[in-house]
Amino acid sequence: MPTAVDPSTRPAPDRPSRAARDQDRTARRIRLLLAAAIVAAAFNLRPAVTSLGPLLERVRDGLGMSATVAGLLTAVPSLCFALFGLAAPGLARRIGPAAVLTAGMGAVTAGLAARALAGSTAVFLLLSAVALAGIAVSNVLMPVIVKRYFPDRVGPVIGLYSMALSAGTAVAAALAVPLTAAVGGSWRAGLGIWAASAAVGLALWLAVLAVGRDRGADPGAGSPAGAAEGERSLRILRSPTAWALAVFFGLQSTGAYATMGWLPQIYQDAGISAGESGVLLAVTMAISVPVSFALPSLAAARGDQRLFVVLLGGCGLVGYLGLAFAPAGAPWLWAVLAGLSNCSFPLAITMVGLRARSAAGVAKLSAFAQSLGYLISIPGPVLVGALYQGTGSWYAPVGLLAVLLVPQMGVGLLAGRARQIEDEV
C-alpha cells in the first residue's frame, strides 16, 4: 500500500527569485526607455529640413541670401546625409551606437538653436550642416540600435521609428508658419523652437546612457572585439543585395523629395488653390504615418519583402500617371497614392535591419545603402525642376518619376529576397 505523502514535505515548485524578477522588471523598463528615446529621436530627424521650406523666403530676406544659395539649401541635406553617414559605423565601433546617437542628437539640438541666431548666410549654412551631420549619423545608426537592443522585435520597433519620423516630417511642415506667427512672427524664433523638441530627444538618450552605466551594462559601449573585426572584414562592395538596397533607397528618396518639393506646384498649375494644394501635400505626408507603423511589422513577418516592393511601386505608378494627365480629376486619390509610394522608405529601413545577421553588419549595410542612396537622390528634384522649366508642363517631369519606379521595383525585387549579406561576401 503506497505511503501517503505529507503535502508540507513536498518540494515547492521552482519560482524565479526576487532578484531575478527585479532584474526582469528593470530590463523591461530600460527597453521602454530605449523605445521612447528611439521615438523622440526619430521625430526630430526631419524638422531641420521641413521647417525651413515654408520660411525660406523670410530667411532669404533676413540674411540677404541669393536665389542660388537658397537653391543650394535643397541639396545640402542629402549631401550631408551621404557624407557624414559614412562616419557612423566607425564611430559606433569605437564608442557604441547609443553614445554616437546621443552625440548626434546633441549636434541637432545645438545646430538648430545656433543657426536661428546666425548673422550671415555662411554661418547659417555651417550651423545647418552641424544639425544635418547629427541627423546623418542618427539615420544610419537607428536600424543598428533596433537590431542590437530589440533583435526579437525588429519589425514593430522600426515601425515605431518610421511612424515617428513621418510624424515629425508632417508636423514640422504643417506647423512651421503657425508656430512662427505664435512666437511673434520672427523666422529666427520659428526655426529655433525646434531645438526644444530636439532637446527632449537628447535628454532621453542621456538617460539611456546613464541608466546603462548605473547597471554596469552601458548601452553606449563599443562593439566587442570579435564583432568589430567582423564588421571591418565585411566586404560590403561584393554584396549584390547591398548594391540593390542602396539603389532602391536612392530611387525611393528621389521620388519622395521630388513629391515633397513640387506637388503643391503641380496642383496649383492645374487650377487648384494654394490652400488646397498645401492640404493635399499634408495628406501625402500624413498617410505615411499609420502605414509606416504597420508596414515594417508586416514586412518583417514575411521574411521576403518583394510583394511590398511591387505594391508600393504600383501605387506610385498610378499616382504619377494621374498627376501627369489629370491632376485636378481626382487630386485626393493621387495624393494618397503618392503618399503610399513614399512609404518605400520604412520598407527600405526594414530591409536594412533584416539583410544582415549582426548589429555590426547592419551598421555597415546601413551606412553604405543610405550614403550611396542619398547621393543618388540629389539630382532628381533638380532635374524635375529643369524639365518643368524647359517644357512648361508636368508631363515630362512627372513622367520621369513614373519611369524611375520601374528600376526601383527591379532593384527592390533583388533587395527584398530573404537573404543576408554575410552569405554573399
Image (cartoon, helix red, strand yellow):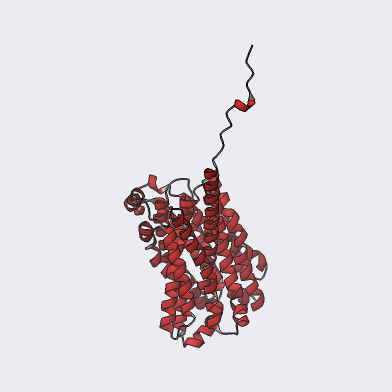
Q: Is residue 347 above or below residue 392?
A: above
Work out which quarter of the rendered image holds the N terminus and state it: top right
Residue 377 visible to the viewer: no
> Between residues 203 and 233, which one lies in front from this camera angle?
203
Please report the residue visible at 66 percent of the width from the left and 68 percent of the height from the top. Answer: 331
> Between residues 393 and 129, which one lies in front from this camera angle?
129
Residue 44 locus on image (x, y percent): 52, 67
Quadrant of the rendered image containing residue 101? bottom left
Residue 235 locus on image (x, y percent): 33, 52
Please report the residue visible at 46 percent of the width from the left and 60 percent of the height from the top. Answer: 210
Residue with the most extreme top position:
1
Q: Is residue 15 above or below residue 161?
A: above
Q: Is residue 207 above or below residue 236?
A: below
Residue 236 locus on image (x, y percent): 36, 53
Residue 161 locus on image (x, y percent): 54, 59
Counting labels gives: 0
Quadrant of the rendered image containing residue 189? bottom right
Residue 130 visible to the viewer: yes
> Between residues 406 and 7, which one lies in front from this camera angle?
7
